[in-house]
Amino acid sequence: MTYHTDDTIIALSTPPGSGAIAVLRLSGNKAFEFTNKVFRSFSGKDFSSFKSHTLHFGSIYDKEEVIDEVVISLFKNPLSFTGEDVVEISCHGSAYIQQRLFQLFIKQGARVANPGEYTMRAFMNGRMDLSQAEAVADLVASTSEASHRIALQQMRGGFSGEIKELREQLIHFASMIELELDFSEEDVQFANRNELKELVSNLITHISDLASSFALGNVIKNGIPVAIAGEPNAGKSTLLNVLLNEERAIVSDIPGTTRDTIEDEITLDGIRFRFIDTAGIRETSDKIESLGIDRTFEKINTSAIVILLFDATLSDAAKLDAAIKAVKEKTAESTKVLVVANKSDLGNEAELRSKFQNREDLIFISAKQKQNIEGLKSKLMEFANANLLHSNQTIITNVRHFEALNNANVALKNVYSGLEKKITGDLLAVEIRRALYHLSEILGQVTTEDLLGSIFSRFCIGK
């Protein structure tokens, strides 16, 4: 996709369809000129006298026909979202009115904006770097307190600020190394190798911490998948209904009732969890139930957390160990398994605990009686590393940033290794440049048209 910044664009900034109010946004060097030709203020003031960041009530005309009474907001460059002259028109939400206004401005020469083109112009005009621009899309798409908090922090420059600081530290030594190359015949060293080694070590640690946060950030952005697994009649469907506070799954005493996965979402303390009730795991000759069990293992394999639920009154330590082993064989190393003993209301908890050798990782609940459900939720929050969300630690949610950080770290590790081996400055310079390149990729200081097209095409039109 090719983006142009020398024309004026228009798009609907509110959801399409009829509503109380719709907002159309114009951005470009002729936004004021186009608006001035069709807008008449009720105050009688001339459009050219309007100050930036002000609101004005009036009517939009098509020749002498009144299309609508509107409120316009104007923002003069460079102090606007896009860094260009911007006009926002708040009109009545009739689809017919919106269409007439579009036709009116397009007739004058405005162009319908491409997806994400307003944010792209903000990036191109230096109003934000590329990581901040990507955070705008994440903010619009946020569905929980946690994803909202992370996106807002990144849009305000928290992440890019860290990257800029890391980059500046490295640039200082890069310039010293480059200077050495200019005086290579004189065999001088301007960059202190011990200081450079210490810096590179600190950068590797910092970047590794940022990259490792992606595991949490990615699931928070998309919702944390939690599979509820276990044998038939362990109470998985009952637990799902209790967690969701609604009768979402069919509950029955007949084993194998759940033949397929059932999914739904809840938000706990600002974090979105996607719970998946799976078919009971057991040996069966029923083809339909077997398909359900196959899907159970598929869901277990893709979940960040697995709640392994078992009937505390029927199981024992050996069976539990075998179940845990079977689940862990089907999950990634990073997947966390939460072992939960259900139906604790049917026995003495102390006796039940002793039956399972007083394992400390067991959580005892009664899904039917809703006992210790809050304890289970607290453990889920702990497993989700929710404490990081309430700290000032930067959390990465974008796979492009994750890849760039890893690539930068590979280059920095090569620099560190080279320093230990006392390699020449020209070879160090190659790896330092590579690390700087990947850090610059995050900020958008190194871009291609294909990259920008890929990023901004995922935005909604009007943002």
Image (cartoon, grey):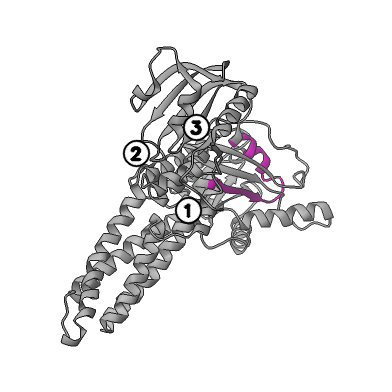
The residue indicated by pointer 3 is 25
Which residue is at the front of the view, 215 or 335?
Answer: 215
Q: Which residue is mark 1?
A: 398
Label pair 3/2, CB-CB below 8 angstroms: no
Q: Quadrant of residue 53?
A: top left
| Element marked by disc 2 | loop
The residues bearing labels 1 and 2 have C-alpha atoms spaced at a distance of 28 Å
Check disc 3 and report its element: helix, strand or loop.
strand
Left or right: 81 with respect to 308?
A: left
Classify mark 1: residues with Cα within 10 Å, few (<14), some (14-19) or many (20+).
some
The span from disc 1 to disc 3 (Cα, nearest Å) is 28 Å
Residue placed at 34% from the left, 66% from the top?
436
Crowding near the residue tagged with mark 2, few <14, some 14–19, many ≥20 C-alpha atoms within 10 Å: some
Closer to the chain start, of discs 1 and 2, is: 2
Precedes in sequence: disc 1 or disc 3: 3
Q: CA distance from mark 3 to mark 2?
A: 16 Å
What residue lies at 28% left-to-right and 69% top-to-bottom? 200
Q: Which residues are magenta?
A: 222-243
Q: Are marks 1 and 3 in contact (CB under 8 Å)?
A: no
Q: Does label 3 or label 2 sit earlier along the sequence?
A: 3
> Under tag 1, what secondary structure?
loop
Q: Is residue 235 in view from this perspective?
A: no
Horizontally, residue 19 falls left or right of residue 76, namely: right
